[in-house]
Image: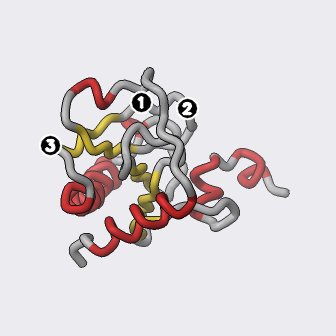
Amino acid sequence: MTNDQIMSSIFSKIVAGEIPSYKIAETDDFYAFLDIFPLAKGHTLVIPKKEVDYYFDLEDELIAGLNVFAKKIAIAIKKTIPCERVGTTVIGLEVPHAHLHLIPIHSVHDMSFAKPKLKLSREEFQEIAEGIKKNLAV
C-alpha cells in the first residue's frame, strides 16, 4: 500500500469504487451520492474527486465547479423530494474531504445535525437515488 492509499478518505474510497454508494451523478472532477446517515430523504453529499480536507482550501476553479455541479443535483432533489428548499451546508469535521451537504428542508430546524438520523432500507435508498437521477438535467 502506498501512502496515498493509507491516507485516503472514505469519500476517495467511494469514488474509487472500493466502498459502495448510492451514486447520483459523476463527472471527471465531482461525485454526488446519498448520505447513508441522512437528516432527510434525499440528503446528498457532493464532493470534489480531488482529496482536499478543508472546503475553503479548494482552488477557486474547483470550488466554483463544485457549486455549479451541486446546483444541478439540488434542482433534481427538489423535483424528487417534496420540500420547501434544498438547504446546503459545509461542516467538514466528520470526514477529512471537502464536501457539501444538500438537504431537502421545510424549515431551518431540518438542517440540525443534532437531530436523529433517518434509518432507511437499501430499497429506499435505491428508490430515492433513482428518482433523483431521473430528474437530473443532462
At label 3, counting other C-alpha atoms closer than 10 Å, the crowd grade (few under 14, some 14-19, many 20 or more) is few
Position of 63 relative to 92 (above/below): below
* Secondary element at image label 1: loop
What residue type is disc 3 on? Answer: Glu
What residue type is disc 1 on? Answer: Ile
Circle nearer the viewer, 1 or 3:
3
Q: Position of residue 22 (x, y in %)?
A: 51, 62
Q: Give whichever of 41, 61 is nearer the camera.
A: 41
What residue type is disc 2 on? Answer: Glu
Q: CA distance from mark 1 to mark 3?
A: 22 Å
Q: Position of residue 94 (x, y in %)?
A: 55, 32
Quadrant in which the N terminus appears? bottom right
Residues marked 1 and 2 touching at CB (< 8 Å): yes
Look at mark 3 in the image and give the residue it sits on.
84
Circle nearer the viewer, 2 or 3:
3
Quadrant in which the C terminus appears? bottom left
Position of 107 relative to 35 (above/below): above
Quadrant housing residue 48: bottom left
Q: Which numbered circle lies on residue 35?
A: none
Q: Position of residue 109 (x, y in %)?
A: 27, 24
Q: CA distance from mark 1 to mark 2?
A: 8 Å
Residue at figure coordinates x 52%, y 63% from the top left: 123
Look at mark 1 in the image and give the residue it sits on.
91
At label 2, counting other C-alpha atoms closer than 10 Å, the crowd grade (few under 14, some 14-19, many 20 or more) is few
Look at mark 2 in the image and give the residue it sits on.
94
